[in-house]
Each structure stands twice: as structure tokens, then as C-alpha cells.
Image (cartoon, rainbow, N blue to C red):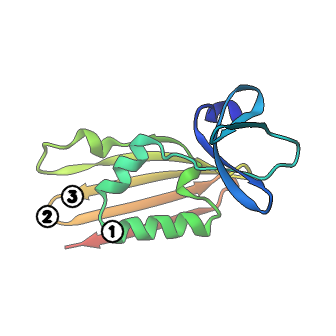
Amino acid sequence: MLDDYLHQEIEIFRMNRWKKGKLYESGKVRIGYEATMLCDHDLVRIRKHLIYSLERLLDGIIDDAFFQFVTTLNSLNFSIYDCIYCYNHLSFLTDENRKDGVNFMVFDNQEQICNVQHHFCYFEKINDRFEFTLNTGKRLIIEKIIS
């Protein structure tokens, strides 16, 4: 799994503090001019990156809808950084007066899977509807309408 983060910044907890470094092959980490090896049970922090299409989607929705979406996602024990797939249909509708369609997102927190459908219609009213479905069968629907 660490191979996904090669040549990226990571942090290692050493000598009671977090030290920033860059990860290289075979568990080698360069901290400043010093190179060290990762050991079993080392505490490591890696900043996850958002999927580009999800980042664009979150930038494109109104603040209230964004807040409701993230709050609901977090209440289901998922983070936006758990996104493994996002189809952002809204990004293809930049020149249209009336924007409507559905975006699809899949989240995996390593315990459960959550599929989210974001139904949107931006015309005379702004309507954002999020339908959350977990692999357990649990479903939640939230909707934000602004006239």
C-alpha cells in the first residue's frame, strides 16, 4: 500500500515528535539530508489527496449542500478522503443555462462501502439531493432546495 505514496511527503513519529520526509522505494524515507528506514510499528501519517473529480464537485455545490453532505457522510463514519470513485456530471455542463443530472461517488472506509448519488437541478431553484446507500442496506436521503 505504501507504493501508492512513493515520492510523496509523509510524517514519521520519531523521538516523541513528527518528522516530515519523502518516501522512497523499499521503505526508505529521506528526512532533510538524512535517510532512514521504516520499521515495524512505526507511526506514519500520510496526507491523502482528494480525487480530482470529487474536488471539482465539492467546489461546484453551494456551501449549505456541501455542509449537509459532509456532515451526513461523517455521521456514517466516512470521510471525503475515503472516496475511491467519483463521476462528476456537473463538470460537463459548464455552458448550459439549466444544469441537471446525477453525480456518482463510492466511498470505502475499509469496514463498509457507501454509494452516494447526487441528484442536482440548477435552474429556477437550486436543488441538491444526496442518496446514501451502505453495503449493509442502510439508506439515507438528504435534500437542500433554495428558491
- Badge 3: residue crowd in 10 Å (few <14, some 14–19, many ≥20): some
Residue 10: quarter of image:
top right
- Residue drawn at x 32%, y 42% is 89
Q: Name the image quarter holding the N terminus.
A: top right
Asked whether residue 1 is in view, the answer is no
In the picture shown, does residue 68 fall above or below 28? below
Which element is circle 3 on? Answer: strand
- The image position of residue 123, as x and y in percent, is 16, 58
In the picture shown, does residue 30 fall above or below 132? above
- Residue drawn at x 58%, y 50% is 47
Picture disc at residue 124: 2
In the picture shown, does residue 85 fall above or below 112? above
- Badge 2: residue crowd in 10 Å (few <14, some 14–19, many ≥20): few
Badge 1 is on which residue? 63
Badge 3 is on which residue? 122
From the viewer's side, name the closer residue of 137 and 50. 50
From the viewer's side, name the closer residue of 75 and 38. 38
Q: Name the image quarter holding the C terminus.
A: bottom left
